[in-house]
Amino acid sequence: MKKIRMTVYLDPKTYDQLCAYAGSRRQPLSIMAEAAVAAFVDPEQKEAGMTRRLSRIERQLERLARDTNISVEAFMVYIWLWLGANPPLPEQVAAAARASATERYDQFMETLGQRLAANTRTVSRPEGDERVGP
């Protein structure tokens, strides 16, 4: 099929991006421009792009669920070991221990709320990591 010649005016930034993309693929500009226009107007290609993006989001959510499950399991193992290593307190000191624990828990919750409000994180991801989360 014979192709039709067309003149297109592009923003310099868009043109530079097209040149860089075509250069990285080692393809002529006309082929890259034709593919971009086809992707823009062809509903099947739009759908394929949407499917790729949804697949990427799905993988990110799966990694997030996996990381959350690992964190929950690690915390549960820690609590289980802690409870096994610490015997119950005698009755005469249990009330004082509960009062101290309540006070420390309230301090913990206040500190946690402040850190979350300030968006302060102890654990951070490396720059460029696509994983979802703090």
Image (spheres, helix red, strand yellow):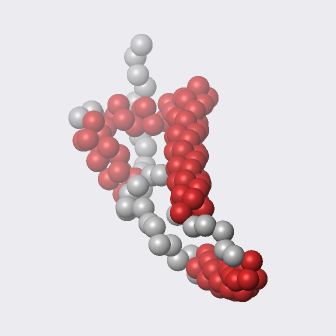
Residue 65 image position (x, y, % from top left): 58, 46
The residue sitting at 24% across, 41% down in the picture is 23
The residue sitting at 67% across, 74% down in the picture is 89
Q: Nearer the viewer, residue 122 or 35?
A: 122
Vertical side of 44 occupied by 90: above or below: below
Residue 13 image position (x, y, % from top left): 37, 58
- Quadrant of the rendered image containing residue 102: bottom right
Q: Nearer the viewer, residue 115 or 33?
A: 115
Q: Nearer the viewer, residue 26 or 68?
A: 68
Q: Residue furthest top?
A: 1
Q: Nearer the viewer, residue 61 or 47?
A: 61
Residue 113 image position (x, y, % from top left): 66, 79
Residue 107 image position (x, y, % from top left): 65, 85
Left or right: where 74 falls relative to 105: left
- Quadrant of the rendered image containing residue 26: top left
Left or right: where 15 falls relative to 62: left
Vertical side of 123 occupied by 41: above or below: above
Q: Quadrant of the N terminus?
A: top left
The residue sitting at 70% across, 83% down in the picture is 93
Can residue 133 be seen by looking at this rendering?
Answer: no
The residue sitting at 58% across, 79% down in the picture is 115
